[in-house]
Image (cartoon, rainbow, N blue to C red):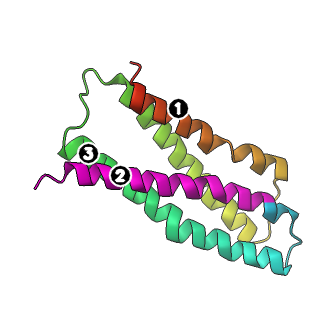
Amino acid sequence: MDFYLYVKAFHIISVIAWMAGTLYLPRLYVYHVQAAVGSELSETLKIMERRLLKAIINPAMIATWVLGLVLVFWYGAIDWSSDFWFHAKLLLVILLSGFHGALSKWRKDFEADRNTRSQRFYRIANEVPTVIMIIVVVLVIVRPF
């Protein structure tokens, strides 16, 4: 049985899970900024943020990377000599991974009650994964270069 389509399907599923969490976590940070330090809401948001990151976003990112690398190196899904769109996609996925790291750091700041960023900062940050996602999907589907 050829597992290529299964690997591809689970890669897409993991991307969806990664994006869902990456889009939701900064929104939680917007709410967390409004919560008084030590309040019941603040402590509830800390739990929600930790669980979202540890149980959904981190595993989904790892699965996305592993399955993506399997598609590229095991199944040869990319023609390195002519698929220039893939280089742009890879750069954007690396940037998204860096954003993921920033989300982790910001969660630790909230956990330690030392957040110094504003609601506006997190509202703007919330748009970063959306923009990256749109560009990546266009690159994958249209393959403009």
Q: Residues within 10 Å of mark 2 (few under 14, many from 20)?
A: many
Give the CA distance from mark 3 to mark 1: 20 Å
Residue 80 on image: x %, y %:
26, 27
Q: How many marks?
A: 3
Q: What residue is shown with label 2? A: 11
The amino acid at mark 1 is Ile
Which quarter of the rendering shows the C terminus? top left
Residue 124 on image: x %, y %:
75, 43
- Vertical arrangement, residue 53 with respect to residue 42, above or below: above
- Is-magenta flag for residue 83? no
- Residue 51 quadrant: bottom right
Residue range in magenta is: 1-30
Mark 3 and 2 residues: CB-CB less than 8 Å, in contact?
yes
- Vertical arrangement, residue 103 with respect to residue 108, above or below: above
For residue 100, side relative to residue 90 (left or right): right
The amino acid at mark 3 is Leu
Q: What residue is shown with label 1? A: 135
Of mark 2 and mark 1, the one earlier in the sequence is 2
- Residue at the image point whose x is 40% and y is 30% from the top: 141
Which quarter of the rendering shows the N terminus? bottom left
Q: What residue is shown with label 3? A: 71
Secondary structure that dominates the magenta span: helix
- Residue at the image point whose x is 47% and y is 42% from the top: 94
For residue 125, side relative to residue 129 (left or right): right
